[in-house]
Image: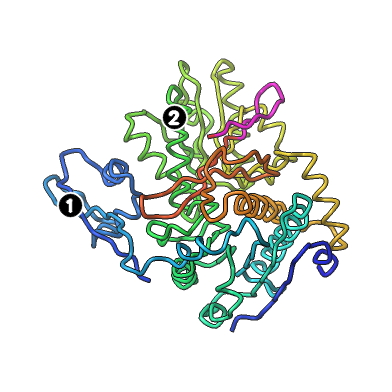
C-alpha cells in the first residue's frame, strides 16, 4: 500500500484504530374501502416499512387494515439545529482550489469477512485517487478502522475528522446516527457505500447512499418489473423453503402486481411437471420469478422449464432473477440465454472492459496479488465511488449533487445517478439495470 501512496500529489494516510435526532411530523389518512398498506404508502411516496413504523401495531403479522380507520403518514421535516457549518465554510474555502480531504470510516482489518471486504474496497478508493492525479486532482486521505460495535465518538473527536470534505462510511447501521449528526454539523459529504438501513437519509441533506436498503430495493425492482413486463404473465415459483431470503421480494412484487391489477399465477418447484405446466399462459409471454437465489433451486427451475418446453413447445418463457446470479453466469450462461433471463442489478461487471483490465493490472502491480474474488469486485466498486465523488467535488465544490448528466463518466461496473429523497433529505443512487441474456446469445443492459 505504501507504494500506492508515493504516487499521490499530496496524500497522507492516518490509519487509526477506533476505540441529532430526526424532526418528523405526522399527517393522518382515513382508510378507504379496498385500500391496502402497500397502496397507501405508494400514494404518499413513502415505503411500506416507513408507514408501518409510524403506526403502532401495524408491524404485527395479524394486523388488519380497516375501512374508516385513521392512520399516521410520516412527513420528514428539517431538524431544528443551527445552520450547518458548510454554509460559512463555502464562503471562505473553495474546495476546487486545493486538495480534497477524503475520510474513510470502515472496518479495515483482517479479522473477518467484513474487514477483508472493506480493505479491498479501500484499495479501490486509493487506485481512484492515483488515477485522478493525472487530471490534476490531488487528495489528502484519512482512514480509520471502525469495526462493528465501535463507538465513533473517539474517532469523530480527531481534528482530522472535522477537516474532511467527504467521508466514506459507515458499513453498519448502528454507526449511522453518530456519523450522520457529525457530517450534518460539519457540512461534510457522507457517502454510504452499501445497503445499510439509514433513516437519516430522509432529513440529512449531506448524505449520499449508493445502494438502497433491502426494502427499498425490493420496491424499486417490483415497480420496474411491473413497468417492463406489464403485458406479460408473471408466475411466482415457490421453492418451499420458509428461510429463503427472497420471500420478501416476491411478497413485495405480488403487492405491486395486485396494486396495478396485473394477474399472476403461483406454482411450486415441488409440483409435478403437469401441474407446473398448467400455470403457464399460451397467449402471453410468461415471466417466472423464483423466490430463491440458491443454485440448487435455480437448477431445479431449469429442469422444470425443460419439461414444459417438451410438453408445450410454443409456450414463451422468460426468467427473472437476482443479482446473486451474476456470480453464476459462467456456469449457467447457456440456460440464461435459452430462457431469456433478466437479472436486476445496480451493478454490472465489464461496463467499461478496457478500464477494468487496466485496474486489474494496476491492482496486481500495487498490491502484489490479484483482486480478491468478491461479488461484486469490491476494488472496482471503490474505484467507481471515489472517482465519481472526488471528480464531482473538484468540478462543482460542495454544490455537487451527483445528479445525472453532471459530467461524463463511464463507470467500470457501478452506474451512479443520484436523486434527492425528500425536500430536506439527502440523495440516493437511482441508477438501475436489467441485465438481459437474450436468446440470440447476446447480452444487453437496460438502464433506468
Residue at the outermost left position: 68
Residue in view at x 65 percent, y 58 percent: 97
Q: Which residue shows up at 14% across the image and 45% down it?
A: 67
Q: Is residue 184 left or right of residue 343?
A: left
Mark 2 or mark 1: name the one nearer the start of the chain. 1
* Image coords of residue 432 (percent x, y): 55, 40
* Labelled disc at residue 227: 2
Horizontal side, residue 98 vs residue 24: left or right = right
Determine crowd level at label 2: few under 14, some 14-19, many 20+ residues with C-alpha closer than 10 A.
few
Q: Residue at x 66, y 26 (%)?
A: 338
Q: Residue 315 placed where, x, y %?
A: 54, 19
- Inspect the magenta stretch and tell me whether residue 423 lies in it: no
Circle 1 Cα neighbour tier, 10 Å, few/some/many (<14 / 14–19 / ≥20): few
Which image quadrant is residue 393 in? bottom right
Instruction: Indicate the secondary structure of the residue bearing disc 2.
Output: helix
Q: Quadrant of residue 258?
A: top left
Q: Which residue is mark 1?
A: 28
Near-viewer residue (357 or 331): 357
Inspect the magenta stretch and tell me whether residue 440 lies in it.
Answer: yes
Q: Nearer the viewer, mark 2 or mark 1?
A: 1
Give the secondary structure at mark 1. strand
Quadrant position of the N terminus in the picture: bottom right
Residue 18: percent from left, percent from top? 60, 80
- Point out residue 140 in the picture as x, y percentages from the top left corner: 69, 66
Question: Is the stretch drawn in magenta largely helix, strand or loop?
Answer: strand
> In the image, what residue occupies the spot 32% across and 29% down?
261
For this orientation, the residue located farthest to the front is: 92
The answer to whether residue 411 is above or below residue 280 is: below
- Residues in magenta? 435-447
Amino acid at each position: 500500500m505504501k507504494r500506492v501512496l508515493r504516487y499521490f500529489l499530496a496524500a497522507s494516510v492516518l490509519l487509526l484504530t477506533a476505540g441529532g435526532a430526526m424532526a418528523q411530523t405526522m399527517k393522518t389518512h382515513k382508510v378507504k374501502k379496498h385500500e391496502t398498506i402497500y397502496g397507501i404508502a405508494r400514494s404518499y411516496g413513502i415505503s411500506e416499512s416507513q408507514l408501518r413504523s409510524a403506526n403502532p401495531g401495524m408491524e404485527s403479522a395479524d394486523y388488519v387494515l380497516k375501512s374508516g380507520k385513521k392512520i399516521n403518514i410520516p412527513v420528514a421535516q428539517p431538524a431544528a439545529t443551527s445552520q450547518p457549518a458548510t454554509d460559512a465554510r463555502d464562503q471562505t474555502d473553495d474546495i476546487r482550489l486545493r486538495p480534497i480531504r477524503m475520510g474513510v470510516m470502515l472496518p479495515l482489518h483482517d479479522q473477518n469477512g467484513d474487514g477483508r471486504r472493506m480493505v479491498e474496497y479501500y484499495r479501490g478508493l486509493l487506485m481512484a485517487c492515483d488515477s485522478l492525479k493525472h487530471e490534476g486532482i490531488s487528495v489528502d486521505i484519512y482512514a480509520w478502522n471502525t469495526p462493528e460495535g465501535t463507538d465513533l465518538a473517539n474517532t469523530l473527536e480527531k481534528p482530522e475528522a472535522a477537516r474532511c470534505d467527504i467521508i466514506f462510511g459507515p458499513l453498519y447501521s448502528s454507526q449511522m446516527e453518530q456519523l450522520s449528526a457529525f457530517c450534518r454539523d460539519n457540512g461534510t459529504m457522507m457517502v454510504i457505500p452499501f445497503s445499510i438501513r439509514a433513516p437519516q437519509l430522509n432529513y440529512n441533506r449531506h448524505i449520499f447512499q449508493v445502494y438502497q436498503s433491502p426494502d427499498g430495493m425490493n420496491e424499486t425492482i417490483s415497480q420496474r418489473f411491473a413497468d417492463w413486463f406489464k403485458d406479460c404473465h408473471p408466475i411466482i415459483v415457490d421453492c418451499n423453503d420458509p428461510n429463503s431470503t427472497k420471500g420478501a421480494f416476491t411478497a413485495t412484487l405480488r403487492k405491486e402486481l395486485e396494486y396495478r391489477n396485473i394477474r399472476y399465477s403461483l406454482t411450486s418447484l415441488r409440483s409435478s411437471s403437469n401441474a407446473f405446466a398448467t400455470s403457464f399462459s399460451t397467449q402471453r409471454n410468461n415471466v417466472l420469478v423464483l423466490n430463491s437465489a440458491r443454485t440448487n433451486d435455480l437448477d431445479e427451475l431449469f429442469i422444470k422449464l425443460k419439461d414444459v418446453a417438451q410438453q408445450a413447445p410454443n409456450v414463451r418463457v422468460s426468467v427473472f432473477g437476482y443479482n446473486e446470479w451474476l456470480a453464476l453466469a459462467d456456469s449457467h450462461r447457456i440456460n440464461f440465454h435459452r430462457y431469456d433471463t433478466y437479472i436486476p442489478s445496480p451493478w454490472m461487471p465489464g461496463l467499461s472492459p478496457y478500464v477494468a483490465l487496466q485496474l486489474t493490472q494496476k491492482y496486481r502491480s500495487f498490491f502484489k496479488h490479484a483482486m480478491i474474488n468478491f461479488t461484486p469486485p469490491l476494488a472496482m466498486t471503490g474505484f467507481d465511488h471515489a472517482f465519481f465523488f472526488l471528480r464531482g467535488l473538484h468540478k462543482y465544490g460542495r454544490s455537487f449533487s451527483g445528479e445525472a448528466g453532471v459530467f461524463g463518466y463511464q463507470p467500470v461496473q457501478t452506474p451512479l445517478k443520484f436523486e434527492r429523497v425528500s425536500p430536506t433529505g439527502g440523495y440516493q443512487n437511482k441508477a438501475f439495470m436489467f441485465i438481459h441474456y437474450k436468446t440470440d446469445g447476446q447480452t444487453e443492459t437496460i438502464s433506468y
